[in-house]
Image (cartoon, helix red, strand yellow):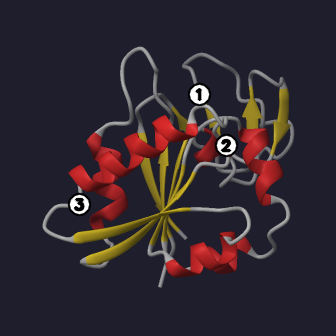
Amino acid sequence: MNTKFVLHGGFNKEIGFIKDEFFQEMLKDAPKNAKVLLVYFAESEEMRPVRTKQGISQFEKNKGSGNIETRIASQNTFIKDCKWADVIFFSGGRTMRLMEALKKYADLDEVFKGKTIGGDSAGANFLGRYFYSKGLQEVGEGLENYIDGAPNPLSDIEPNLETLFLREYETVVKFC
């Protein structure tokens, strides 16, 4: 079974949270009684309660006729949490904070296999091979939120690499 990746380009705090389309796509291929893991490792401590409430609310709102059970990921039980889940959502925040939290876990590709994995902003960045952070002015592992007219900062690293440029509120689905 393929792994489904649902990638979101982020949102503008002044405009509003992630739109329904993203959460509907996350749950579209999930079992009728889906287990949803919410990962907030990229968020600051002060924003986690707000984002947790928003995330749970959006998944509940968009579950359709199915049922969902949600769990908040813990760094102490992360692999166990992932194995439990059908759907794993990585919140936005700071990409490097998320990368730092996840670097201690080996073989995430294997853990994610056959699941729906979604990421918003920083949560999408870490899922790619490389990402470019305008704030850090460096290339790391993951994807980049793209603004029209900006040069592709990855072209010098690997010219034939498939790139994906996500705009705010844009949702893209990939199967691997």
- The crowding category of the residue bearing disc 1, from other C-alpha atoms within 10 Å (few below 14, some 14 to 19, many at least 20), is some
Q: What's the residue type where badge 2 is placed?
A: Ala
Q: Is 169 rendered above or below residue 112? A: above
Residue at the far left in the pictured view: 65
Of the two numbered discs 1 and 3 in the rendering, the one whose residue sits closer to the viewer:
3
The reply to whether callout 1 and callout 3 are in contact (CB within 8 Å) is no
Q: Nearer the viewer, residue 76 or 169?
A: 76
**Residue that numbered label 3 is attached to:** 63
The reply to whether callout 1 and callout 2 are in contact (CB within 8 Å) is no
SS class of the residue under badge 2? Answer: loop
Quarter placement of the C terminus = bottom right
**Residue that numbered label 1 is attached to:** 146
Q: Nearer the viewer, residue 165 or 53?
A: 53
Residue 147 place in picture, x, y as percent: 57, 21
SS class of the residue under badge 1? Answer: loop
Mark with earlier residue (2, 3): 2
- For the residues labelled 1 and 2, the Cα–Cα distance comes to 19 Å
Q: Is 11 rendered above or below residue 36? A: above
Residue 49 place in picture, x, y as percent: 51, 40
Of the two numbered discs 1 and 2 in the rendering, the one whose residue sits closer to the viewer:
2
**Residue that numbered label 2 is attached to:** 42
Q: What's the residue type where badge 1 is placed?
A: Tyr
Residue beneath the point at 83% across and 36% down? 139
Left or right for 30, reference 161: left
Left or right for 171, reference 68: right
Residue 99 place in picture, x, y as percent: 78, 50
Specify the quadrant of the image occupied by residue 79.
bottom right
Q: What's the residue type where badge 3 is placed?
A: Lys
Residue beneath the point at 38% across and 31% down? 17
- The crowding category of the residue bearing disc 2, from other C-alpha atoms within 10 Å (few below 14, some 14 to 19, many at least 20), is many
Residue beneath the point at 37% across and 59% down? 26
SS class of the residue under badge 3? Answer: loop
